[in-house]
Image (cartoon, rainbow, N blue to C red):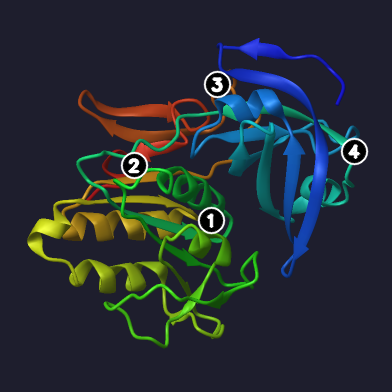
Amino acid sequence: MTGSYQANRDTIFVEDARIVSVADFPGEQFVIRLSSPRCASRATAGSFIHIQCDAAIPMRRPLSIMRVNASEGWIEILFKIVGDGLRALSRKQPGDEASVIGPIGRGFTPDRQRPRALLIGGGVGIPPMIYLAEELKNDDHWQPLVIMGSEIPFPFETAPSSIETPWLSPRTSSTMPLIENWGIPTRLATLQGFKGCHAGFVTDLSRVWLRSLSKDEMAEVSVFSCGPTPMLEAVANLANEFGVPCQVSLEEFMACAVGGCAGCGVSVQTDQGPAMKRVCVDGPVFDAKEVFAS
């Protein structure tokens, strides 16, 4: 790895990251591991990087961080090819370098008074849920459940789960082995008829679980989600339906990604009334009630 580091706001760094590995999955989806020790040392679940896809393409792309190993100095990202930039990034090989700015943004903030964490990820919104699940697995206090949805093949090899979910039909058995190995129950939803997946939306599957809880158990629930805006709105409505708090990570086009251009502004509700917030540095994680009217 070559290059220098430039601190920005004491938490964001410019780093010449080295490609460690590249894995491709159906649907033009890719998982890339980057040696990026400064970014890895400061990342939190929900933060993202702004990566230069190719020297000939000046505009960077914001990508959520999926996994981190601070001691080994690497991060992983998952993306689906959309446009020339991400296509160029998908062609990177181990040993290549890519300029990375990160970690950027406010991540998720779990409340220890609500240990039953429901993590809902859709499509390219799956990475932050994997990151958050890995953080929660290190503390027995948490009781996470991960629900993921996709309308293209999932960006991992699915497998039948061995973790019992008595609230759910045994026909819905497919899981992500990585999270399964952490001891966290995980179930998958789709409208595409994939084997072992719930036939419906992630909110349909989540509602089945929420309805199975007692009043005391419901008081311990919190929801965390990332995915397309229509899905996030549906998740926010679901959380409101059951009276549980919900944090959502927004997806938005960005130019600078560090708060200078304000091109990623969204309207939110504050105690003082409507306001514009920047997804990059004021988010990307927001209280769902700030973003979606109930």
Q: Which residue is mark 3?
A: 259
- Mark 4 crowdedness (10 Å alpha carbons): few <14, some 14-19, many ≥20: some
Q: CA distance from mark 3 to mark 2?
A: 19 Å
Q: CA distance from mark 1 to mark 2?
A: 20 Å
- Secondary structure under tag 3 reads loop
- Secondary structure under tag 4 reads loop
How many marks the image carries: the answer is 4
Q: CA distance from mark 4 to mark 3?
A: 29 Å
- Mark 2 crowdedness (10 Å alpha carbons): few <14, some 14-19, many ≥20: many
- Position of 224 compared to 25: left or right? left
Q: In the image shown, does 36 or 275 lie closer to the viewer?
A: 36
- Position of 32 compared to 157: left or right? right
N-terminal-most mark, 3 or 1: 1
Say which quadrant the N terminus sits in: top right
N-terminal-most mark, 4 or 3: 4
Above or below, 128 against 266 in this view is below
Q: Which residue is mark 1?
A: 126
N-terminal-most mark, 1 or 2: 1
- Position of 53 compared to 38: left or right? right
